[in-house]
Image (cartoon, grey):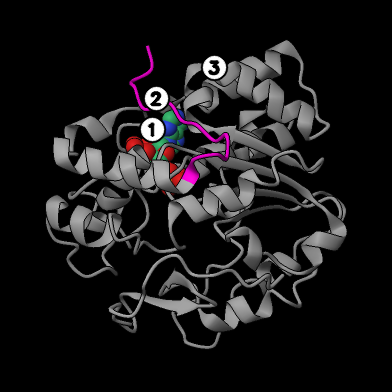
Amino acid sequence: MSEKTTPIVDYSDLEFKQGSGVHIWDEVIYPWFVHAETLDAMSDFQVRHDDVYVISYPKSGTTWTQEIVSLINSNGEPDSVKDKHVEERVPHLEMSTAIPGTILYPRITAMPDDKPRLIKTHLPYQHMPKDFLVKKPKIVYIARNYKDVSVSGYSFLRMYKAYDDVGSWNDFCQGVLLKELTPYGPWTAHVLGWWQHRRDKNVLFLKYEDLKKDLRGGVIQIADFLGKPLSDEAIDKTVEHCSFKTMSRNPMTNFTGLDAFDHKVSSFMRKGGTGDWKNWYTVAQNEAMSKLIEERIQGSGLEFDYEPAI
Ligand code: A3P
């Protein structure tokens, strides 16, 4: 799906750091764990008609949406998902192994074809497997306001042992966020790329802030979209199982078992809300970020809530 776009960000200063940094593939910055070979291989990846993709810009509530989709797929029965990590139930399409030149997606191609595959990806629209345009699988896209995404992302990079020291918030905000040098490319490009397809029949475009305000409504909406309407009892169980409180205590969703993270630095399930950015952004940083976001998304009709939900 290589629709060439003009890069809006100057990547010329970006250093490629093998093993712990980023690289550029088709004008988009990718983290080291997404190898160029994996991205090349997307042109041959076979999509299935009944696949379900959970898609997002990182730190937008992907794990939350994976868990909701997974539980709906199991008819809202928490027992059926309690022994398998969410990343196994809804594997990450472009995650590559640490060995250069190898790709993990064969474990996805090997998934049985008698039930829908649930797949997570952070790929921007233009880098999705070519076959995706032909097969038109169901897509649940989750978007979140960038100020909270960026704070969540900064905290995540701090705890991710594979990354070099990310430095202070001030340096990160000035040197990475406001220069739009984040992995998976600028947030605005990613979200707008999918927003333009929000009316496609196979796409459900959701916002984190709406889910936060009305999780039950979101669960019903996703279940209906997936063609798996649930009983009231199953909806109640799904809502309870996917609440922040329950997910942050569940080892199958809270990533506490993952050695790649230093859990003393931060947690994966950190605050789980809207508005924490106010504790991080200075007045000047907020003004600069608001201006940047407005410049990029104006006229698109895309809007976000930034205020803490009541
Ligand atoms: P915070 O760091 O702001 O707490 P992703 O899964 O895309 O990496 O996103 C992680 C963010 O989603 C984290 O945000 C995490 O706490 C939040 N999250 C995960 N599960 C959630 C839930 N059940 N309810 C609300 N937020 C959730």
41 magenta-colored: no
The one of 187 and 117 positioned closer to us in this rendering: 187
- In this rendering, does residue 106 appear at all? yes
Amino acid carrying mark 2 in the image = Lys
Classify the position of the C terminus by image quarter: top left
- Element under disc 1: helix
Task: Name the residue that disc number 1 marks.
Answer: 249
Position above or below: 73 against 172: above
Classify residue 12 as left or right of residue 171: right
Q: How many numbered callouts?
A: 3
x%, y% of residue 97?
Answer: 49, 76
Tell me where the magenta segment starts and ends, as one range. Answer: 297-310
Amino acid carrying mark 3 in the image = Asp
Q: Which mark is residue 245?
A: 2
Amino acid carrying mark 1 in the image = Arg
Residue at (43, 58) in percent of width and height: 186
- Element under disc 3: loop
Disc 3 versus disc 1: nearer the observer: 3
x%, y% of residue 241?
Answer: 53, 26
Residue at (33, 50) in percent of width and height: 153
Task: Name the residue that disc number 3 marks.
Answer: 214
x%, y% of residue 55?
Answer: 60, 49
Question: Which of the 4 image quarters holds residue 125?
Answer: bottom right
